[in-house]
Image: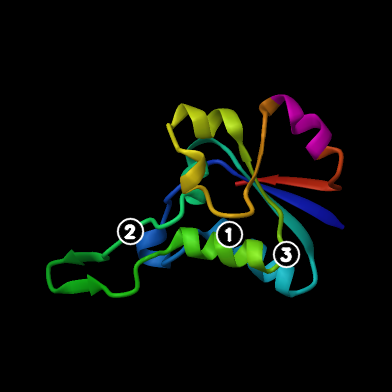
Amino acid sequence: MKALQIIESAYRCIVEEQDDPAIWIVQVLKTAGGEVDILLRGSAVNYAVSGQGNDGLTLGSWQQTCPAKVDQDLQQALDSGLKVYAIAEDIAQRGIPEAKLLSGIQKLSRRDLPNLFEQYQQVWRW
C-alpha cells in the first residue's frame, strides 16, 4: 500500500522528542518496507530549508544536548529514496529562496494536489 504523509504543522514537540514525529514515523515505515512519501505544506515547508541552526535549549540546570536537526532528518529521508514534495505557494509566501531548499525537494502547486493524491492508496495528514 502506497501512502502519502501530509505534514502541515512544523516544530511541534521537537525539544523533547529531538525530531518531528511525523518525519520519524515515515522513516520507520520506509525502513520496514513501506511505500511512503511526504508532502510539506503550510509552516512545515520550513523543514525543507537546509542549514537550519539549533544550539539546543537550557532550562535552569537542564540542557538539551541533542537538539533537533529536522533539515538533516528530511535529507536522510530523501537519501533513502522517499519523495518529498513541498507546496510552491507556501514556500513563496514564506520568502524561502530556491537556493536554500534541500536538494531533491519537489515543488508543486496546490492545483496539482488532486493528481498527486491519485498516486496513493492512503493520504495521512499530520
| 91 over 22 or under it: above or below | above
Q: Position of residue 119 (x, y in %)?
A: 86, 44
Q: Is disc 3 surrounded by few (<14), some (14 to 19) or many (20+) residues within 10 Å?
A: few
Q: Which residues are magenta?
A: 111-116
Q: Which residue is mark 3?
A: 81
Q: Earlier in the sequence, mark 3 or mark 1?
A: 1
Across and down, in percent, residue 113 comes to 74, 32
**Looking at the image, is 85 positioned above or below residue 113?**
below
In this view of the protein, can residue 9 be seen by the observer?
Answer: no
Callouts 3 and 1 close, C-beta under 8 Å: no
Instruction: Give the residue type that dot 3 points to.
Output: Gly
Q: Nearer the viewer, residue 67 or 102?
A: 102
Mark before the other along the chain sequence, 2 or 1: 1
Per the rendering, the mark at residue 53 is 2
Magenta segment includes 113: yes
Circle 2 Cα neighbour tier, 10 Å, few/some/many (<14 / 14–19 / ≥20) = few
Q: How dense is the environment of label 1, judged by Cα within 10 Å: few (below 14), some, or many (20 and up)?
A: some
Q: Amino acid at mark 1?
A: Ile
Res 96 quadrant in image? top left
- Residue under the point 73% across and 68% down: 30
- Residue 36: % across, % down: 75, 58
What is the spatial separation of the Cα atoms under label 2 and label 3, in whole angstroms? 25 Å
Query: Residue type at mark 2?
Result: Gly
Look at the numbered discs 2 and 3 and tell me whether their residues touch, using CB distance below 8 Å.
Answer: no
How far apart are labels 2 and 1 at the CA level? Answer: 18 Å
Name the disc covering residue 23, or none.
1
